[in-house]
Image (spheres, rainbow, N blue to C red):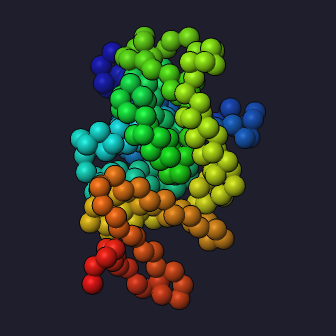
Amino acid sequence: MSDSQADSSLMQVSQGRGPPPARQPQAGLLDELNGFSGSWFEAGGGFHGMMNYWFRTATLAWLTGEIEAVQMNHAVRDARKGYGLTGLLCSWNMLSSHDTPRLITSLGDAEKARLALLMQFTLPGVPLVYYGEEIGMEGGADPDCRRTMRWDLAQWNHAQRDWVKRLISIRQTNPALQYGEVTVLGDRLAGNALGAAPDTKVQAASVQLDIAPRSGAIYQAADPHTHYTYFKPRNRG
């Protein structure tokens, strides 16, 4: 199938959005595109959200050192602009799927996997945990990523499962993480940091990850000093 045929088929599918929500008003229609999907939202394709492979690509690239923090921060900002707030909040934040290598296999490091999961639950979007991700299942390219669920509790990474349960609790008790507008702050830090501030105007949260081997602080302006925008490194004059 050519690219034009594929685009035509996807557009025909998108134009069928009407009936499902009419039957089930709470239902959503998601599209699967392996890349940045802003053009589909801009074209009025009819999807509520995306399987956000863009999130996966950027997150893994940053944690493996393929890109720097400035690019990671721009990836979050670009998704907010390209998908729109509603489209982004309705999209799935994915770190692996039935079509990709699993998280721990891609990163090869348990601590980096924990950071990726933290990003999955705190950046705008719906966290989609691929089965077995919560217990540290490995798996390479398809079909290896589709292994049968590991049911032997002795083989589970219980620390990772506890971490995922903690992240679920944090997200459930913080509305700003679920549907807040997001301001990207990490590019104000002269380090390898990602910073975001979800805000519902009633509740705000602060998400900061710095994978550089040094300390720093990000300051967010707040009323009545909203015109202040600055960063002050620790232990400096």
Q: Considering only vertical position in the picture, is 231 above or below 119? A: below
- Between 46 and 197, the one lying in front of the other is 197
Q: Position of residue 77 (x, y in %)?
A: 38, 57
Q: Residue at x 56, y 11 (%)?
A: 148
Q: Front-most of 87 and 204?
A: 204
Comparing 146 with 166, the one in front is 166
- Residue 28: x and y in percent read 63, 38
- State the residue at coordinates (24%, 41%): 66
User: Is 182 located above or below residue 142 in the figure?
Assistant: below
The x and y percentages for residue 47 are 53, 39
For this rendering, which residue is in front, 194 or 22? 194
| Identity of the residue drawn at 47% across and 47% down | 119
> Could you tell me which residue is drawn at 44 percent across and 59 percent down?
208
Left or right of 96, for residue 156: right
18 to the left or right of 93: right
> Residue 173: x, y in percent?
69, 55
